[in-house]
Image: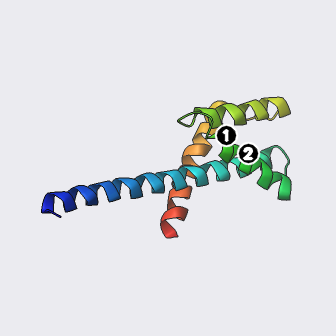
Amino acid sequence: MTTFDKREQAFENKFAHDEELNFKINARRNKLLGLWVADKLGKAGADADAYAQAVVMSDFEKPGFEDVLHKVMKDITAAGAPITREQLCAEAERLLAEARTQVMAE
């Protein structure tokens, strides 16, 4: 294996590692967001955990975060909870930083 091949493989390994890390961070953010929304909707215990899992799974519908926002806003609206999209996005940003800290500490 030449030096170029080793370098290319190192870049590919770093890319794969970074993508896996981003996936874990986003999944953790979605779980934390789901738990936050569940609390706002009056869910607790197993119901809150199940809701958070549903939020995590909603991220697999389409690329990006919009599918998660759509699901959560639909649930918030149906429940009549006083949470705006702006509040939800601000909380998601805060939780993204928290999720990054948690994942990096593992």
Q: Is residue 2 left or right of residue 106?
A: left
**Residue 19 point in image, percent of width and height:** 43, 51
Quarter residue 14 falls in:
bottom left
Quarter residue 57 falls in:
top right
Residue occupying the point 19% across, 58% down = 5
Residue 91 tag number: none
Whether residue 13 appears in this view of the structure is yes
Q: Is residue 74 left or right of residue 91?
A: right
Residue receiving disc 1: 58
**Residue 82 point in image, percent of width and height:** 77, 34
Q: Residue flagged by tag 2: what amino acid is it?
A: Ala
Residue receiving disc 2: 54
Residue occupying the point 78% across, 55% down = 49
Whether residue 44 appears in this view of the structure is no
Pointer 1 with pointer 2, Cβ within 8 A: yes
Crowdedness of circle 1 by 10 Å Cα count: few (<14), some, many (20+)?
A: some
In the rendered view, tell whether residue 77 sits above or below residue 45: above
In the rendered view, tell whether residue 58 sits above or below residue 78: below
Q: Is residue 88 left or right of residue 2?
A: right
Secondary-structure class at tag 1 = helix
